[in-house]
Image (tube, rainbow, N blue to C red):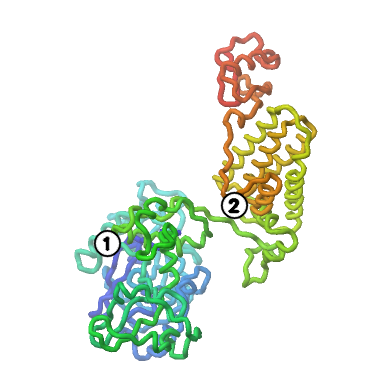
């Protein structure tokens, strides 16, 4: 998404001319130059006013003013009709000398390339839609590889040298062929592939001083100033004599005044401009009367580096403590919506790289891992919950009916972290019951009869620690909740078995710790009230497991003979390959399938044993 936003495009800058006025046009497809039947300028292009014919001036000016009021996103939308207006001017084609009409079109953006494009309707869908709308010519100049082209002697051939029996035309009445191929209708370049023609045309244009190879980006300047009260003040003082003067370091930070009318005025200036005792100051250089800058910074100017501040939030002299940043940063995991990719995430990367190049930090990427959460869909219409749609389920309503822990647990249990999930009020009832069962266990375990040490009971505890830990680390919160539900079921079943009292206490302690990130309030109550712990559970260490005890006691082994399933055996989980081979060969079903044939090999691959006969 960031690469697309940056918009790096390799191509050529081609110079058309309008009289003596050069008109550079950027194109990623120089091979289609002979198919250019019009030029389109962005409404903001500086040439528009100069080249427009007098009889077209009013219409062009009105159209351009209307287009400039639209956002770039709306203008470039793929599903929007392409509109334009003819300037009355024509440009000279750099290779053919033909006159090419010049239009103004709203789908051409000023920030990309030179703000001008050559319209090649046969090979660009947008240009074709524009040409159809305004009756402009459509000339095919690139054919698919199987399309025949004439060689120097006038004979038809294809790139492979074979005459096609069923070639496909490169253009139909309503579609543009946007792929590469072999050039046609392109004068001396006929028969060249698109790649070869691009190289040759670019070289020929450069030799004539009418073009060059060029890389274009959609990058534009970032205006970070805002005419509003809220925001970080820009530490500049404007002096009539000295110009723009930085606020001296000893006077930083510049603080916003607390008494101010927040509403903007009709003059378009920031509300700060009306606070005379804040605005009017002495110039730090000459001491004369001066004024503070009244614009504030865009919110992204702060949110692009806030994570550096988190490492030393109480640092009073500097933005951050370099030693603390070296210890804590970069951020291990960033969690956010996919829409952050070309906003906060992009800006944060930009600021981080600038600070790295300036020697302020020792890393150039701010976040080591990115996790995008899924969307919660409304039960009303199946769409993303949104205040603007009026289809939200407010958390307060759910908390009032079920409690915070039930809400948190249900949201995590709905599905995979990064998937879309449909909210269903009925599902939270099951979570309610689960938490009630957890609480009942916490209240009752101390009254259960003491028994001998139970090996299976202890193994179940170590297995759930290992499973929940792995799920939490991989953001599989829904399966972590499922594992805890299964463990609670196992604990209820264990009440009918003899289990040592110490084991029960450890089981409830483990359950509370594993539940704490998911349902923090009930876990805290279990920790303090049922277990009698003095400190908060949220400061306690995460439980650890013993790998030997967490291992599955038994597992199912699939046995094949020459690749065909013949038997399933139950074996200890830690059984070695030799043991598994012996078990497979001892199976009556396997022996029957092998018969009198000699066994050539026995292959063990994890839980599959394959007996291969001669």
Q: How many numbered circles does the render carry?
A: 2
Q: Is tag 2's residue or tag 1's residue first in the polypeptide sequence?
A: 1
On the image, the x and y values in percent for residue 523 come to 66, 49
Determine the residue located farthest toward the right in the rendered image: 496
Label disc, if present, on residue 417 of the rendered structure = 2
Label disc, if present, on residue 464 of the rendered structure = none
* Res. 465 image quadrant: top right
On the image, the x and y values in percent for residue 146 come to 41, 51
On the image, the x and y values in percent for residue 348 come to 41, 61
Residue 452 versus residue 60 in the image, above or below: above
* Res. 381 image quadrant: bottom right
Label disc, if present, on residue 213 of the rendered structure = 1
**Residue name at image x 37 percent, y 52 percent:** 326
Q: From the image, state whether disc 2 or disc 1 is nearer to you.
A: 2
**Residue name at image x 60 percent, y 26 percent:** 607
On the image, the x and y values in percent for residue 152 come to 28, 55
406 sits to left or right of 183:
right
Between the residue at mark 2 and the residue at mark 1, the CA separation in whole angstroms equals: 46 Å
Q: Is residue 37 visible?
A: no
Along the line of sight, the residue nearer the viewer: 79 or 367:
367
Residue 571 versus residue 21 in the image, above or below: above
282 sits to left or right of 140:
left
Q: Is the Cβ of the residue at disc 2 closer than 8 Å to that at disc 1?
A: no
**Residue name at image x 76 percent, y 56 percent:** 426
Along the line of sight, the residue nearer the viewer: 572 or 451:
451
Q: Quadrant of the C terminus?
A: top right
**Residue name at image x 47 percent, y 71 percent:** 73
* Res. 274 image quadrant: bottom left
In terms of secondary structure, where does tag 1 sit? strand
In terms of secondary structure, where does tag 2 sit? loop
């Amino acid at each position: 998404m960031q690469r697309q936003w940056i918009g790096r495009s390799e191509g050529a800058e081609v110079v058309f001319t309008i009289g003596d006025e050069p008109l550079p046009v950027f194109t990623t497809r120089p091979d289609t130059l002979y198919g250019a039947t019009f030029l389109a300028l962005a409404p903001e292009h500086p040439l528009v006013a100069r080249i427009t014919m007098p009889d077209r001036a009013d219409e062009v000016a009105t159209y351009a003013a209307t287009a400039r009021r639209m956002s770039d996103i709306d203008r470039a939308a793929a599903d929007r009709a392409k509109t334009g207006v003819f300037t009355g001017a024509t440009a000279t084609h750099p290779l053919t000398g033909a006159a090419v009409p010049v239009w103004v079109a709203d789908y051409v953006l000023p920030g990309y390339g030179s703000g001008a494009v050559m319209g090649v309707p046969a090979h660009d869908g947008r240009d074709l839609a524009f040409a159809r709308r305004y009756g402009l010519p459509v000339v095919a100049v690139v054919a698919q590889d199987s399309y025949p082209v004439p060689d120097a002697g006038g004979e038809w051939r294809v790139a492979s040298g074979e005459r096609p029996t069923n070639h496909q035309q490169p253009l139909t009445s309503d579609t543009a062929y946007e792929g590469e191929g072999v050039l046609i209708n392109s004068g001396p370049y006929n028969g060249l592939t698109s790649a070869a023609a691009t190289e040759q045309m670019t070289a020929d244009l450069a030799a004539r001083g009418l073009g060059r190879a060029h890389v274009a980006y959609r990058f534009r300047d970032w205006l970070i100033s805002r005419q509003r009260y809220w925001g970080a003040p820009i530490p500049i003082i404007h002096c009539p004599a000295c110009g723009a003067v930085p606020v001296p370091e000893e006077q930083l930070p510049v603080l916003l005044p607390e008494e101010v009318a927040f509403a903007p005025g009709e003059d378009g200036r920031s509300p700060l401009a009306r606070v005379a005792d804040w605005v009017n100051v002495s110039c730090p250089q000459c001491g004369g009367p001066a004024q503070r800058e009244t614009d504030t910074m865009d919110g992204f100017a702060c949110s692009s580096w806030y994570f550096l501040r988190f490492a030393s939030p109480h640092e009073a002299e500097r933005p951050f403590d370099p030693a603390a940043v070296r210890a804590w940063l970069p951020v291990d995991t960033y969690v956010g919506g996919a829409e952050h990719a070309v906003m906060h995430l992009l800006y944060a990367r930009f600021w981080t790289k600038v600070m790295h190049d300036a020697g302020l930090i020792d890393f150039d990427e701010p976040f080591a891992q990115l996790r995008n959460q899924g969307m919660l869909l409304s039960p009303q219409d199946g769409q993303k919950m949104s205040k603007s749609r009026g289809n939200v389920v407010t958390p307060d309503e759910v908390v009032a009916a079920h409690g915070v822990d039930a809400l948190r647990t249900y949201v995590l249990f709905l599905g995979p972290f990064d998937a879309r999930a449909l909210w269903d009020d009925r599902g939270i009832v099951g979570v309610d019951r689960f938490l009630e069962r957890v609480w009942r266990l916490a209240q009752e375990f101390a009254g259960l009869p003491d028994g001998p040490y139970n090996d299976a009971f202890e193994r179940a505890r170590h297995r759930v620690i290992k499973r929940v830990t792995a799920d939490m680390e991989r953001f599989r919160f829904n399966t972590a909740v499922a594992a805890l539900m299964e463990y609670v079921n196992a604990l209820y079943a264990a009440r009918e078995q003899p289990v040592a009292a110490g084991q029960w206490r450890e089981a409830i302690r483990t359950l509370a710790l594993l539940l704490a990130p998911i349902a923090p309030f009930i876990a805290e109550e279990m920790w303090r009230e049922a277990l009698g712990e003095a400190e908060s559970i949220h400061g306690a260490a995460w439980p650890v497991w013993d790998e030997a005890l967490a291992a599955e006691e038994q597992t199912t082994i699939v046995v094949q003979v020459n690749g065909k399933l013949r038997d399933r055996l139950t074996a200890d989980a830690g059984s070695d390959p030799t043991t598994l081979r012996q078990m497979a060969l001892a199976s009556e079903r396997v022996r029957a399938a092998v018969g009198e044939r000699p066994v050539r090999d026995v292959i063990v691959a994890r839980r599959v044993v394959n007996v291969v006969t001669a």
